[in-house]
Image: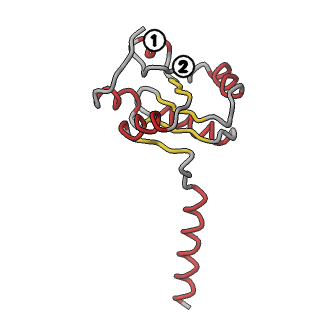
Amino acid sequence: MKQIFLFLSVVSLLACGNQTAKSDQYLTLSVTDFADKMKSEPGILLDVRTIEEYQDGFIAGAQQYDYYETASFKAALNGMDKDKTYYIYCRSGGRSGTTLDMMQQMGFKKVYNLDGGMLAWRRANQAVVKP
């Protein structure tokens, strides 16, 4: 009886784990992996910080959409081509992580998030553009 209970417990845990795992189409990537992925698989780069944060420096080619402007932010996402590849980042990874989840739920095919956001990008001495 104990073996059956243990078996069912393990199967249950594995099944639940698979439901919440993100596929390789929705990932949070390290700075190095994010930069490499953008080079090997071009896509659209989204900066989801405020305009003030954006003006302090951004990754070359990034389009700025303020996460905190909820209505216009969601409208902008709704207007984007869900079949394209997207790269997203914010200041430290919180807003872009939430955006990754939103975009996955909205049916976007490939979305990659920068782990640690611009703080990590700068710490890694990656190029930053100032307007």
The local crowd at label 2, few if under 14, some if 14 to 19, many if 20 or more residues have their Cα within 10 Å, is some
Q: Which kind of residue does numbered mark 2 sit on? A: Gln
Q: Which kind of residue does numbered mark 1 sit on? A: Glu
Determine which quarter of the picture holds residue 111. top right
When the figure is inspected, residue 50 is found, relative to residue 33, above or below; the finding is: above
Which residue matches tag 2?
63
The local crowd at label 1, few if under 14, some if 14 to 19, many if 20 or more residues have their Cα within 10 Å, is few
When the figure is inspected, residue 55 is found, relative to residue 40, above or below; the finding is: above
| Residue 76 spot, x, y in % from top left | 67, 22
- Along the horizontal axis of the image, is 78 left or right of 92? right
Which residue matches tag 1?
52
| Residue 69 spot, x, y in % from top left | 60, 19
User: In terms of secondary structure, where does tag 1 sit?
Assistant: helix
Determine which quarter of the picture holds residue 115. top left
The residue mark sitting in front, 2 or 1, is: 2
Q: Please give the label number shown on residue 30.
A: none
Colour scheme: secondary structure
Residue located at (50% from left, 21% from top)? 62
User: In terms of secondary structure, where does tag 2 sit?
Assistant: strand
Question: Farthest residue in the bottom direction?
Answer: 1
Question: Farthest residue in the top direction?
Answer: 131
Question: Gap between marks 2 and 1, in whole Å?
Answer: 14 Å
Residue located at (55% from left, 36% from top)? 98
Between 67 and 33, the residue placed more toward the observer is 33
Residue located at (55% from left, 55% from top)? 21
Question: Farthest residue in the front direction?
Answer: 40
